[in-house]
Amino acid sequence: MERGVYFDAWYPRQHCYHPSLPPRRLRMVDDLVDYRATVLVWSALGGGSLSLPYLEQEAFGDVGARARFYGFVNDAEFIAACQARGIKVLGIVFEAQGWEFPVELDEDETTVLALNELRGVGRRGWLGLREFSSDRYPRLWPSVSTYFPDGLVNSDGEPVTDLIEECVARDIHGNPCHARWVECPDREHQCFYMDRNNPVWREYLKAVIRIQVDAGVDGVQLDEAELPMGAMQYGACFCRDCTRGFREHLRALPADRRPGELDGVDLATFEYGPWLLERGHDFRIDQKDAPLFGEYYAFQCRAIATHFAELAEHARAYGRERGREVLVSGNFFNLDAHYLPLAEQVDLIVTEMRNTTYRQPEWYRYAAGFARLVGGKEVVVVENPYGGVVPELVTALSQGRGHDLMRLSLWEAAAFGVNMTVPYGSWMGATLEDSFWAPHELLVQVQDFVAATDGLRSGAVGGNELAVVHSVPSLRDLVARADASDNLRNARDTSVVVPYRVTTEALSRAGVPFDVVVTTDGELQADRLVAADLAPYRVVVLPGCWWLTEQQVDVLVGYLDGGGRVVVTEEPARNLPDARTEALRRHPSLSRAALDDTAAMQPDGPQVRLGAPLAVNLHLLADGSLACHLVDHGYDERVDAVPGHTDVALAVRVPAHLRTARRARVVRPGEADLVVPVRREGDHLCVELPRTGVYTVVVWELGEGSA
């Protein structure tokens, strides 16, 4: 498993200013080695969304003798220093961000005296994409023609001299949109929300990627990977290229799929924005009820997949031109279904979870299931400061408290199959003047245990007997309603019942381990469910799965015929004719349960019996061993710790090849491994754990411990 670091290295008690990250020092590399880091995300070379010359200064600029005295290096030198210690560095491409900053220059406009944070000196102006693309400061920066000798030409064949005016996302009234989540409200700077559907912006992003590759990055991370779908929170996008692309999408629809609202409409000249306004819709209020919204969403899903793939291929191809293989990743935020085609294009899945809480095993299991669908790729998670617990955790840590909460943050993810990054001056949003740091010794302890137990984890499919199906088409609208909020708040509407979430939260809180199987509609993502996907499980739960493909129905029936058990919370596959689903709905091994009835979801009895309220996940290892990972979320604020439990009885139904095991190994942080005797009760192996803490692993191994 990768061990990631969220390596912004922004300063404490100061805003986290996009897009430029603070200068790097060699001492930082020593810290990263202490944290057992294997990969850095959001870590280098972000200044391309200010300008290409600025990005080159980040990459190759002279940091000056005074800074060298304390080990400061430019980004290319930092990348090389990390690579020498076996740490991969991903360059960050802030795709959605187009920046303009207040600046103070000398009278000759050859030297920057102040940028962003002004001092009241020199000549006041603006510095950013607009000035770069118009060659506003020829004595300060190289000309835009240095990077684009043939110039930049838009989709109408017009020369482009203002990147922001050309490439910004626009609302239905033509107003430019801002990326509000990165603009600091007490600063003058401006971040415009750019649109990757515009070919000019894609050409610019390719130039950013080339500079990053030249600087030696191991990989390229495409932030805001769903660009421009994120602009929908601002009522966008109705720029020329989105409008034209949507028109072409509608014209390409077969006649029998064309929405009735388009009857009599001339699609050769169709303009979606004016058409909506005529019907009283502004694409902000009740957006999802706007006419043609479903088709607009489908158009953007296809566009983001196409254009993400274009940039990913460019990064790889340019890397090969430079004689090496370049990795590609992105930011897949909350792992919504529209990211699935994008995830196909990457080597590593990076997700900035939408809501960071103190207890979320069910989300990590979904993340592992998401990765399983696209080939079992590794997942690296970073926290999100909006709509979660991060600000209060940072405050607690600054007061010397919350150490067990920090341990939980990292160990919980590892137990449930993904990697949670170490925060290293990581993002605290645009409104708080702070960044996320944790005590060094605490992080070293946590990461030492993660590294030491890496061999005790498997991928998305482990030893769990129960699988929960996450049906994308069944849940998409409910998830969208529940999570309808801008990304300055990331609020969740808990009045919206999302069946999958109810079921998986109930299972995790009841200590029932499970895997997640993600199914799609066959259009957004190919329908890949086959018999082998369900074969490892004793029972498969379908919460709210009212929409299934015929292939999925056939796989489920075959699974039932082969001896499996299916539990549904409502009639499955109501989208299909009754005759097509009768074999599934009437099968004697199909049963029904309430969304939170975890006992009914285990018709053969629980796989795990546990004498304490712990969260559980099972990992079946390559050598046949079984590792039971136990996480204790019982943090007691009064003592500022997870007190743990003593004399905990644990019984696990194990595969047949392990039922003769006589001993188990108990692995806990900071302690020598403990061997405990095993008692067999039918198919279950039972042990008594003298003590549990935040994280405990129990391992049944083949070999000397077996009869």
Image: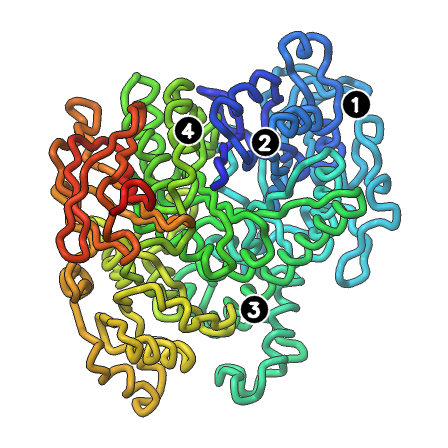
* Residue at image coords 81%, 58%: 158
Asked if residue 211 is positioned above or below residue 552 in the image, the reply reads above
Q: Please tell me whether mark 3 sits on a helix, a strand or a loop.
A: helix
Q: Which of marks 1 and 4 is in front?
A: 4
Q: How many angstroms separate mark 2 from mark 4 (CA)?
A: 15 Å
Q: How far apart are marks 3 and 2 (CA)?
A: 39 Å
| Residue drawn at 27 percent across, 72 percent down | 564
The disc label shown at residue 447, or none: 4
Label 4, label 3: how far apart the Cα atoms are: 43 Å
The dot on residue 297 is none
Q: Which residue is drawn at 52% across and 84% down?
A: 257
The residue at the far front in this view is 707
- Please name the amino acid that badge 4 sits on: Gln
**Location of residue 556 in the rendering, given as x and y in whole percent from the top left corner:** 34, 76
Residue beneath disc 1: 109
> Between marks 1 and 3, how big is the CA–CA gap?
45 Å
- Is disc 1 in contact with disc 2, using a CB cutoff of under 8 Å? no
Q: Which amino acid does label 3 sit on?
A: Phe
